[in-house]
Amino acid sequence: MSGDSRFVAQRIILEVKNMKYDMHSMKAEEFINDAEIRETVAFANEHKNDLALVDEILEKAKKRKGLSHREASVLLACEDEAKVKEIYDLAEQIKKDFYGNRIVLFAPLYLSNYCVNGCLYCPYHLKNKHIPRKKLTQEEVAKEVIALQDMGHKRLAIEAGEDPVNNPIEYILDCIKTIYSIKHKNGAIRRVNVNIAATTVENYTKLKDAGIGTYILFQETYNKENYEVLHPTGPKHDYAYHTEAMDRAMEGGIDDVGIGVLFGLDNYAYEFAGLLMHAEHLEAVHGVGPHTISVPRVKPADDIDPDDFDNSLSDDMFCKIAACIRIAVPYTGMIISTRETPEVREKIIRLGVSQISGGSRTSVGGYAEEERPQDTAQFDVSDCRTLDEVVNWLMRAGYIPSFCTACYREGRTGDRFMELCKSGQIQNCCHPNALMTLKEFLIDYASDDTKRIGEEVIEREIDTIPKEKVREIVRERLVKIADGERDFRF
Ligand code: SAM
């Protein structure tokens, strides 16, 4: 083993400006250490064409136990065509091994665009006086939920600006209660994920008690200096409070947290290393890494021009980032939203994405009011297809669209979910659940063409369930679903 390789394999602790890198630390600037990130990016650049090192890292990755931020950064920087192809092939294979061909579907639900922050990339920033401000009443939440149920959605991610007066935690909790209470025709929202600003341990416990799925919070950028420039005013300005939010969420009892970077705000290689360091920290401290990683890219919006940030990245590099994340954290779900075009989504799904949004509206009240101008939209959507069209497209591309929400309802969260992933039992569990929830969608919401393809997909995929007993139960339940029963799960 060369000196450099040992360097990669080691746990690296740096002492710089009295600030050390320590994944076990609870201090933001120690577990996301600027000097360590810069050293990592420099190391990756220096060694990007060291094919022996790249091979060594790829060999380790094939064991499917993940990679360190440094190792993964070398793969991300690698420019050798043959090795890059190996990286893509491995990402695709790891995705197939852990997630099969299922893609879980969800929709964002915007509750309120009132916000007291000054985020330079977001049109909800306080100084934006010309967008209408809107906060859904509980009646309006119910209307949105009915519209989402009528599309076929079972899983939502609720979104709100940060505003302690207009959007206090009690408002968010009321909305969650309303969402879970609506039973319209055969519809139901069975999992509510929450994407709201960093908050206190007490508030995270309240969210946990309200029965949320994943708590999602994007870091936006891991670069503290730039973070403070991009968040000049408001509570979100506090880098440490924001970066340490997931630790508070876990302390408050939330098992599943979702992290992410808003790509385009800072240098992608810096963000990639920071993101993986965050995952390493959560695993080191809480014994379980992030449940999901999101990879949003900054998009045009009301008074926002992504070119102002000067860090845009090509579609190819964006896909390479997804492939390297897949290899580095094989057990972590990956999410891609309708910020991306159908073409990019198709490419990136293959490389490791496990969840996508579909039929999304990013404006407050956008689902119930078809004809409203999108004047409260948070960003422009690049995939404007209906949920039925997205489901149809996924199946034509060889995937099983899944509306499954079983894991969290069966208590398979946090490390218990990871155990399921690691044990390889997903094929006897998530796979049948995907088929049964797809069947519900086909009967209740699909167009004729989608129904036809879907029935073929289900027939074909039942045979890939490993256990005969499970296959039998699934066949029985599919008949029951056709007879009107709903919500079966393993
Ligand atoms: N307000 C909450 C917070 O402070 O974290 C989160 C909700 S916000 C509605 C959801 C995410 O949208 C933000 O975390 C940000 O990453 C993303 N976002 C904001 N402006 C965007 C833009 N112009 N293009 C793409 N994504 C954007």
Image (cartoon, helix red, strand yellow):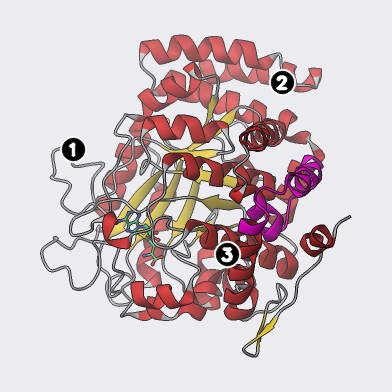
Q: For residue 73: magenta?
A: yes
Q: What SS does tag 3 mark?
A: helix
Mark nearer the N terminus (1 vs 2): 1
**Majority secondary structure of the magenta segment?**
helix
Q: Nearer the viewer, residue 5 or 429?
A: 5
The reply to whether residue 185 is in sight is: no
Label 1 sits on residue: 370
Disc 2 marks a residue whose amino acid type is Ile
Q: Which mark is residue 357?
A: none
Residue 389 forms part of the magenta stretch: no
Q: Residues within 10 Å of mark 2 (few under 14, many from 20)?
A: few
Whereabouts is ligand 1, in terms of quadrant?
A: bottom left
Indicate which disc, 3 or 1, sits on the residue closer to the N terminus: 3
State if disc 2 and disc 1 touch (CB < 8 Å).
Answer: no
The answer to whether the residue labelled 3 contacts the one labelled 1, judged by CB atoms less than 8 Å apart, is no
Pointer 3: what residue? 274
Three-letter code, disc 1: Glu
Badge number at residue 473: 2
Q: Secondary structure at mark 2?
A: helix
Whole-percent x and y of residue 407? 64, 44
The C terminus sits in image quarter: top right
Mark closer to the observer (1, 2): 1
Residue 14, position in %: x, y? 71, 79
Q: Residue at the far right: name it.
A: 1
Q: Residues within 10 Å of mark 3 (few under 14, many from 20)?
A: many
From the viewer's perspective, is the residue at label 3 or at label 2 nearer?
Answer: 3
Q: Which residues are magenta?
A: 45-74
